[in-house]
Amino acid sequence: MLCINKIKPLRVQIKQWRMAGECIAFVPTMGNLHAGHLQLVKAAKAQADRVVVSIFVNPTQFNEQDDFANYPRTEEADLAKLQSVGIDLLYMPEREEMYPAEILTRVSVSQVSEEHCGAARPGHFDGVATVVTKLFNIVQPDKAFFGEKDFQQLMIIRAMVTDLNSSVDIIAVATFRESDGLAMSSRNTHLSEVHRQQAVQLYQALCQAKQAVLEQQTSFAKIEQSYLQVLIEQGFKPDYFTVCRRHDLKAATSKDTQLIILAAARLCNTRLIDNIQLDLEL
Ligand code: PAF
């Protein structure tokens, strides 16, 4: 596994692979790798000749300084995990390499960025869209892999790639879960033992809400209200719990059939997000 932290040598290597006609897959991460990230790598290995992973805790996507400072950084363990799954190249730039000076250009995807996590974390998705654009320009992959846990992020990156005529093929990978159902996330390491036991209730609420939507006995608004209340009673501070149509993440109406329920809630200081998809037959 090559470990590179500068753009120039990275480009030399990528050019060599490209000249040999090899397909390059890219998995961008912020480190603190877990089995969910390794699933992305596995999917990337199955669909390309070369796999590049980046680890960069991107300061511009944190809207709270404490959150950035406390974001888990586990470089040695991450390297060992990537060695064990076998990737070709790890790109681990310093902050100065990605943001050498104040940047004058930002990528902002309107509409789909505005609600849900976008409303709860102002500026977050501009930071994501900007760093992913920069990483795509640096790595120049054929394909890039993103988890469905961050479904809104995935939609934003798809919109960005379409609107900017990027040739990167965006591949979605299903959410990887712990054995009790909790979606894997780097932030789970912040949970105390007690909160870790409780955290799965977010996924359980999504599963129950999905069932309620499928039974079609009450309105989406009532289902949302009742599960927001359930989460509050269980000790969460929910940001949102909302039934959306899958193609644009707008509030679902009774005419929509391809749905997703999105949820985000804080447990103590840890922000958890998750979602569940469902299809209705009308
Ligand atoms: O999903 C993440 O880990 C980050 O938002 C990403 C895509 C690596 C950009 O920093």
Image (tube, rainbow, N blue to C red):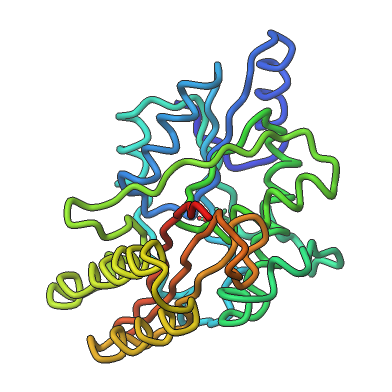
Q: Position of residue 122 (x, y in %)?
A: 65, 81
Quadrant showing the N terminus? top left
Q: Does residue 95 appear in the picture of this structure?
A: yes
**Vertical side of 16 occupied by 109: above or below:** below
Q: Is residue 171 left or right of residue 40?
A: right
Please tell me which residue is depicted at 37% across the width and 54% down the height of the picture.
32
**Vertical side of 123 occupied by 97: above or below:** above
Q: Is residue 45 left or right of residue 206?
A: right
Please tell me which residue is depicted at 41% across the width and 58% down the height of the picture.
276
Please tell me which residue is depicted at 23% across the width and 52% down the height of the picture.
178
Q: Position of residue 247 (x, y in %)?
A: 65, 55
**Vertical side of 146 occupied by 62: above or below:** below
**Vertical side of 14 occupied by 58: above or below:** below
Q: Is residue 208 left or right of residue 222?
A: left
Q: Does residue 76 appear in the picture of this structure?
A: no
Residue 192: quadrant of the picture: bottom left
Residue 251: quadrant of the picture: bottom right
Q: Quadrant of ligand 1?
A: bottom right
Q: Nearer the viewer, residue 159 or 122?
A: 159
Q: Position of residue 83 (x, y in %)?
A: 35, 30
